[in-house]
Image (cartoon, rainbow, N blue to C red):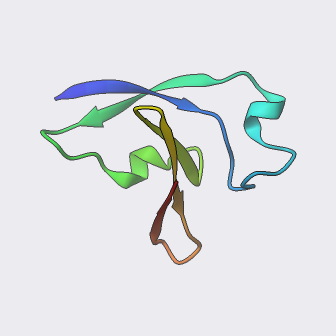
Amino acid sequence: MATTSEDTTSEDNVGGAGRTSDRLSAATRSIAINGNRIESRELFAAEREIIIAHGEDTYRLRLTSQNKLILTK
C-alpha cells in the first residue's frame, strides 16, 4: 500500500470568502492507495471539495449533499 500527499485548501464554500485557505495555511495529509483505488471518504475527510491539477489544467471534485461526485474544469 502506498501513500500520497494532498493539499487541503478549500471548504464546501466554493469560490467564496471564508475558505480554509483564507484562514489557515495549506495542510499536508496522507491518503492510502490500494492498487489503483482511493476511498472517497479519505479524499473528503476534511473537505467537501478537492482541487486536482492535471498538467496545466485545474479541476474541482466536489461531494454533493446527496453524496454524489461532480467533476468540473
Placement of 41 over or under 66, stated as above or below: above
Q: List the single residue furthest toward the bottom.
A: 66
- The residue shown at (47%, 32%) is 56
Placement of 17 over or under 70, stated as above or below: above
- The residue shown at (60%, 23%) is 27
x, y (%) of residue 46? 58, 44
Q: Is residue 30 left or right of residue 47?
A: left
* Residue in the foreground of this view, choosing between 3 and 21: 21
Placement of 71 over or under 55, stated as above or below: below
Q: Image quarter for residue 3? A: top left
Quadrant (top left, top right, bottom left, bottom right) of the N terminus: top left
x, y (%) of residue 11? 69, 48
Q: Is residue 5 left or right of residue 62?
A: left
Q: List the single residue furthest toward the left.
A: 35
- The residue shown at (78%, 42%) is 19
Tag count in the figure?
Answer: 0
x, y (%) of residue 66? 53, 78
x, y (%) of residue 4? 34, 25
Q: Is residue 5 left or right of residue 60?
A: left
Placement of 37 over or under 69, stated as above or below: above
Q: List the single residue furthest toward the right.
A: 17
